[in-house]
Amino acid sequence: MKQLIRYGYARRTSRDRKAEAQLSALHEAGILPENIFVDQPAEKEKLNQLRDCAKPGDILVVKSLSQLGYSYKEILDEWVNITGTQGVYIQVLDIELLDTSVKKKHVDGTFISDLFLQIISFAAQHERDRIKQKQAEGIAYAKSQGKHLGRPRIPKPENFDETYDQWRAGVISAEEAIIQVRLKRSTFERLVKERKEELKQKQAGEPLN
């Protein structure tokens, strides 16, 4: 009969380049050093290798859910793939309920863990939606007050109108105009668009904003 293996997985972060806290937790959980896989930030090469090694009934141990992904959708996908498709158990050290390898009150541990994970994901998604709504409301209010959002706009150079007229008359090229006003092309194009709208409003007798 095959002996079940407990694997550990950690992922380095920009703040914890050596993943010391994760590795310490895995060692304390009794994971052998040769069974611990450590990925670099934003990578899953070692996790893929671990999947290739792990067999149904083996246990994957992580310190926290964040090791499995950068979003709750990614975490859920990994969870379903590992526990459902591969038949490998998952134990999350930071959350006792997230351990599919044990029975809890005579109910299958996988069921309890999956249910708890769904609740966590729902709460996280609800919080993200609430934050987005507050941000949208804040942006709408700022716009209603006439406030400019984002990076400060580069002011129009004093020689822009004169340079614009020369460019429109074909006296100079767009490249020469950009050099004269000392702007990036994107900024020059934005100011050209605003200048056209300004002249259009003047011709129509409309008040300028």
Image (cartoon, grey):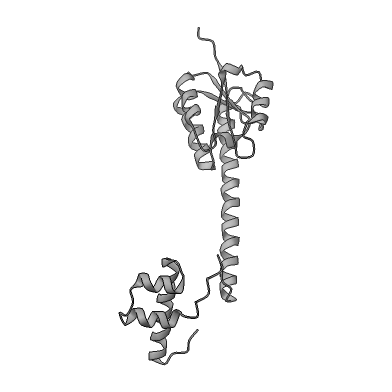
Tag count? 0
Residue 96 seen in the current view = no
- Residue at point 59%, 61% (across, down): 135
Above or below for 169 versus 138: below
Q: Residue furthest left?
A: 170
Give the residue furthest to the bottom. Answer: 205
In the image, is residue 100 above or below residue 208? Answer: above
Residue 186 in sight in this render: yes
Q: Is residue 10 left or right of residue 203?
A: right
Q: Residue at x 42, y 70 (%)?
A: 179
Which of these two is toward me, 138 or 102?
Answer: 138
Q: Residue at x 50, y 39 (%)?
A: 74
In the current view of this chain or complex, which residue is farthest to the top?
1
**99 w.r.t. 157: above or below:** above
Residue 190: x percent and y percent? 43, 72
Drawn side of residue 96 relative to residue 83, left or right: right
Front residue of this view, candidates 20 and 176: 176
Query: Horizontal and vertical percent for residue 126?
Result: 58, 51
User: Foreground residue, 138 or 195?
Assistant: 195
Q: Is residue 106 above or below residue 189?
A: above
Left or right placement of residue 155 versus residue 85 in this view = right
- Name the image quarter holding residue 167: bottom left
- Position in image of residue 124 (x %, y %): 59, 46
Query: Residue at image x 41%, y 87%?
Result: 201
- Between 42 and 155, the one lying in front of the other is 155
Q: Quadrant of residue 63?
A: top right
Q: Position of residue 17 (x, y in %)?
A: 62, 34
